[in-house]
Image (tube, rainbow, N blue to C red):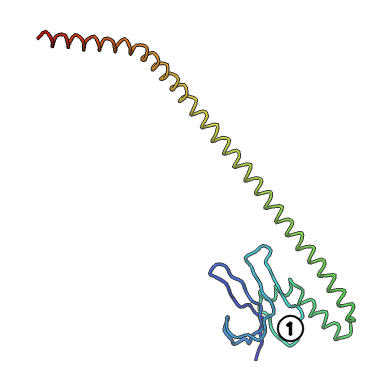
């Protein structure tokens, strides 16, 4: 029974996350498994990986073969290094304390590189956000200037219309009195007739 360390897909369409499992090589992708070793979520940057390193090393020492993707994940998390150091301890090249010290040193450098990547990504996101804000402000200012420029001729036309309206209102009472005079004459004509 060849044992594989592989990924088992879960999650919605377009939003995958995976379990890292040890399973019989003949079982289906989402079928039975022997042990869940961890999980992997590739949708975030950097990807979220939770892995039980000791369990992964135990399966590797028992002859389980990881798939290519899982091999990359195990390497990234240090399980392959720990397996290699355990082989050195078995052969007598290292002591358990030396192997543990080397592994912890490697973990610290790896953690530093991951923190650096996260900081770089957050700085890039903040810079992009600031650039978008400046561009949006420029577009908003341009739009406001265009609106003001378009409103200036309209304001002049409104002033002209108001001036014409004022002159018409001054002339209107005279015209009204003429209308009233004509109406009065018409009444007199009706009375005479």
Give how far across and how far down residue 134 sits, in percent: 63, 41
Residue matched to label 1: 60
Task: Say which of 93 and 17 sits in front.
Answer: 17
Residue beneath the point at 68% across and 68% down: 48
Above or below for 55 versus 192: below
Q: Residues within 10 Å of mark 1 (few under 14, many from 20)?
A: some
Q: Looking at the figure, which quarter contains the C terminus?
A: top left
Above or below for 30 versus 176: below
Q: Is residue 114 left or right of residue 191?
A: right
Above or below for 131 versus 63: above
Q: Is residue 109 left or right of residue 190?
A: right
Q: Residue furthest front?
A: 191
Task: Say which of 185 and 156 sits in front.
Answer: 185
Give how far across and how far down residue 30 sits, in percent: 57, 81
Q: Is residue 81 left or right of residue 27?
A: right
Residue beneath the point at 34% across and 11% down: 171
Give how far across and how far down residue 140 sits, in percent: 57, 38
Task: Say which of 173 and 85 sits in front.
Answer: 173
Give how far across and how far down residue 1 sits, in percent: 65, 91
Among the 4 quarters of the image, the one containing residue 65: bottom right
Residue beneath the point at 40% across and 15% down: 166
């Amino acid at each position: 029974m060849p044992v594989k360390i592989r990924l088992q897909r879960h999650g919605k369409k377009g939003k995958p996350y995976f379990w890292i499992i040890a399973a019989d090589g003949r079982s289906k992708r989402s079928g039975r498994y022997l042990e869940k070793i961890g999980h992997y979520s590739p949708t975030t940057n950097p990807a979220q990986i939770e892995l039980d390193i000791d369990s992964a090393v135990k399966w590797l020492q028992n002859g389980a073969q990881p798939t290519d993707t899982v091999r990359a994940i195990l390497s990234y998390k240090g399980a392959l290094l720990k397996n290699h150091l355990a082989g050195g301890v078995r052969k007598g090249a290292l002591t358990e304390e030396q192997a543990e010290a080397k592994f912890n040193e490697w973990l610290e450098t790896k953690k530093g590189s991951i923190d650096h990547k996260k900081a770089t990504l957050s700085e890039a996101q903040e810079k992009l956000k600031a650039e978008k804000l400046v561009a949006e402000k420029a577009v908003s200012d341009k739009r406001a200037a265009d609106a003001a420029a378009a409103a200036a001729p309209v304001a002049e036309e409104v002033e002209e219309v108001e001036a014409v309206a004022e002159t018409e209102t001054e002339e209107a009472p005279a015209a009204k009195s003429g209308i009233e005079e004509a109406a009065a004459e018409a009444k007199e004509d009706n009375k005479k007739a």
